[in-house]
Structure formats: structure tokens, C-alpha cells
Amino acid sequence: MPTFSTHPDIPDRDAAEGRSEAEEPVVLREADLRPFMAAFPSGVSVVTTIDAGGLPRGLTCSSLASVALTPPTLVVCIRTASPTLQALLAQGQFALNLLHERARCTSDLFASGDPARFERTEWRLPLGASGPHLTASAHAVADCSVVKTAAFGDHTAVFAEAHRVTVRPAAQPLLYGLRRYAEWSAAASTPPPAATPLPPHVVPPEGAARVRG
């Protein structure tokens, strides 16, 4: 999976205080975003495109977000040295495949850099598609055209406008966080904890936070 999900070693804490891990937050010696972003579970996607020689390219990507609804724009962040990024920029288009919860192997495959990954997964290139559609692994696909890029550090943010979206409503998303996968159907089946009601005579002021004891 993407490198931001890898946890560095956690610094030792003062054992003399006798505080448990659950009681105290872990403060890292350096501002490493990997454990921070690992604590923010997200869906999993595979970015795909076709290079100048007609060969499919693709990689697993969890760094994506919607930017605007009008025009329908999203952003994906890809390692600048990636051959997939170079092909994507040369073609000016790509497909964003959101993986369903049974597609863990596809996520690992496209994160591995295996040169035969397209030979080991089912895909097709429909008429008008911006990149290969992973037909057996994706529950939604957005065909996108690149409109702007911004390089920063070792990654490049690619802003793209979606011109077509395909959705399979019956499939559920694959989730990833804390270096492990989870299934949306399992997570969504757990009911939220019941809120503790306030006494009838207590009316919180507008904008006040309701704190449970």
C-alpha cells in the first residue's frame, strides 16, 4: 500500500510515570506524516492509464479527494518518479478505479510494482474510457482528464475533471488504515453508541459542544 501508511518506530516514553498507552498519546520526535495519515482510514483506489506505446499502467493510490462538484474535479497525489504518473501526464487522462471490499489482492498487486499486474487481473478499455477499467475489482470508476498539476516534495498533485462515472451500487468499498484492510459492510453493520440524553431542563446554548461524561 502507499508508503504513508507505514508506521515508524515509536519513541520510548517515561515508564516512571506509570501511564498506559491508552491514557497518553504518542508524541513522535519528528513530524512524520505516515503514522498521522495511517490513523485516517480511507477507501482504496487504483489509478490506470495507457502509455505512448499502448501498454497499460497503474498503481494503488489512497491519496485522493474531491475538489469541486462544478466542474466535477478531484485530485490524486502520486509519487513524482512513478512511471504511471509520467504516462498519465503524457496522455493527459486516466481512470480512477475505487476498489470493492473483495479486492484486497488487487490493491496489493498494484502496490507491488509487479510488471505483470495487468496480466494477473481482469480489465478492459471501454469506448471513451480514459484508462483501463478493473472490471472485477472496482465498484466505481471515474474517467478523468488532467487539468492541472502541482509538484511538491516527492509527490505530484494531479487535478482532473471527471467526464464519466460508472458505479456498481451493490458492491461495497474496501477500506484501509493503520496498515490493515477493513470491509465497509462489516464496519457499517456496527451500530453507533447511543448518546446520553440531557436532562429535560438543560438546554445547551447554540453552538455549544455536548460532552459526555
Image (tube, rainbow, N blue to C red):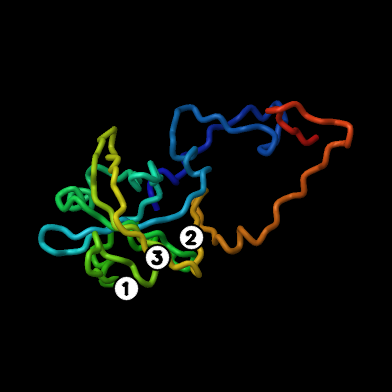
> Label 3, on which residue?
138
Q: Residue at x 41, y 66 (%)?
A: 105
Kind of residue at badge 1: Glu
* Disc 1 crowd, CA 10 A, few/some/many (<14, 14-19, 20+): some
* Element type where label 2 sits in the image: strand
Marks 3 and 1, the one that precedes in the sequence: 1
Report if residue 62 is visible in the image.
yes
Q: Nearer the viewer, residue 122 or 82?
A: 122
> Label 2, on which residue?
174
Q: Residue at x 40, y 50 (%)?
A: 62
> Label 1, on which residue?
122
Residue 210: x %, y % from top left: 74, 33
Kind of residue at badge 3: Ala
Kind of residue at badge 2: Leu
Left or right: 178 with respect to 125? Answer: right
The residues bearing labels 3 and 1 have C-alpha atoms spaced at a distance of 10 Å
* Disc 2 crowd, CA 10 A, few/some/many (<14, 14-19, 20+): many
* Element type where label 1 sits in the image: loop
Q: Residue at x 62, y 32 (%)?
A: 25
